[in-house]
Amino acid sequence: MKRRFRDSKTMLLVFCVIACVILLGCERQEPVSTEIITIGFSALSDEQLDLTILDLEGLDENLDLINIHGLWVDPAQALEIAHEIKRLRSIGTPKIVENPELIETTIGIEPTEKIDDEVTPEVVYKVAPPTHDLSDLEITASPSATFSPIVCTYNTAAELVASCPTAYEIQKIRSDFNIVFDDEIIENDIQAPWNCMDTGDESSIMLSMYNSFRLFMCVPFDQSFPWALEYDNLYEWMLSLDLVEIKFFMASEGQNSHAWPDHIAIIGNNMADPMYRDVINPQSGVGVINLAVLLIHEARHAGDNIMHNCGYKDSNLEYMGAWAVQYYLLNLLAEHSSDFFTAYEIEQFAWEAESLLETRFCELE
């Protein structure tokens, strides 16, 4: 007897997997680890977890791989983990499972203390992703096409930065890009541990970094990019550059963010400033969107090997260097991103674009 799925998305994903494997002979995907399944399922509400268990129990027992909630999993293994999470919740264990052996993962999510649900109902993350040497690149920067699609459920940029990165988003970003931190950041534990609570005011270098990439995923442009006409999503464009490394470093006086072929280096000195928990902080006029724009600027240098051709400026817009990319991006954010940004943010984007046009091009002065 066939079982009717309560989650149409789950039903569709399972159907697509079966059709792909049987009809098209698609290459088999490897299931994620039990640690990642645990983290993903732990983030579900009680109702979502119950529905997931019912759907897993109703699957054909011959299936050995499905995609559920964006994760490729062994269904029998996933069902066992889901039941264990439900059991732990029934005895008052927090949503993030307090089992160090189970939770110790490549993305460094550590167990947290139980929070009073009446005071703080949201899950609190303490996450410390490790640094990766180039020798680990094949492990830490695997092709995204075999891991996961971009998933966005945020209606506005403000909603996105007020929320915490999900385990799915963290794993996707760290799988798609080789993100590293210099020795000073590591030795001083500047990147770890870090905390995040939905609608909270926490700030850290890690949260600022993740929110930049989440914005790349989710800004809904209604036209393609002038510098890459085949793309209209910043995350997909960044991924297409096949960068070797994106490094965050503590800068000395006189140092700037910079790039060279296939490498980006971003100053991390003030990335833990609370202003980066805003899209644009009204007091400073700076926010996490500025970090995102800076990353795109440097990505133009690194991915396409196009450097400034007029000192620290570019000759003109037609050269389509990093300043032109930044100029066009700001205009797209202001005029072609639907209602994702506030009127104040749009005004700031337009002002910054005009300022760039006046100061960063030799032939336009």
Image (cartoon, rainbow, N blue to C red):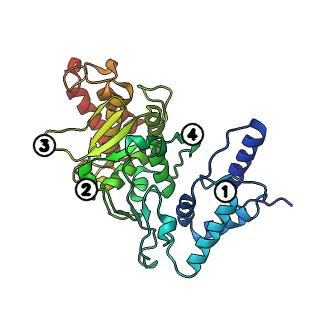
| Residue at the right extreme, as displayed | 1
Residue marked by disc 3: 253
* Labels 4 and 3: the sequence-earlier one: 4
Q: Quadrant of residue 272?
A: bottom left
Q: Secondary structure at mark 2?
A: helix
Residue under pointer 1: 74
- Residue at mark 2: 187
Label 1 neighbour load within 10 Å: few <14, some 14-19, many 20+: many
Residue 270 location in percent, x, y? 23, 51
User: Could you say which quadrant of the image residue 260 lies in?
Assistant: top left
The answer to which of marks 2 and 1 sits earlier in the sequence is 1
Label located before the other in sequence (2 or 4): 4
Marks 2 and 1, how far apart at CA = 38 Å
Distance CA(mark 4)–CA(mark 1): 19 Å
Q: Are marks 2 and 1 in contact (CB under 8 Å)?
A: no
Among the 4 quarters of the image, the one containing residue 77: bottom right
The reply to whether callout 4 and callout 1 are in contact (CB within 8 Å) is no
The image position of residue 241, as x and y in percent, is: 43, 31
Query: Is 249 displayed left or right of 28 in the figure?
Result: left
Q: Which residue is mark 4?
A: 145
- Secondary structure type for disc 3: loop
SS for callout 1: loop
- Choose the circle earlier in sequence order: 3 or 1: 1
Lower position in the chain sequence, tag 4 or tag 1: 1
Q: Comparing marks 3 and 2, which lies closer to the viewer?
A: 2
Q: For the residues carrying marks 2 and 4, which lies nearer the camera in this image?
A: 2
Q: Is residue 299 above or below residue 67?
A: above
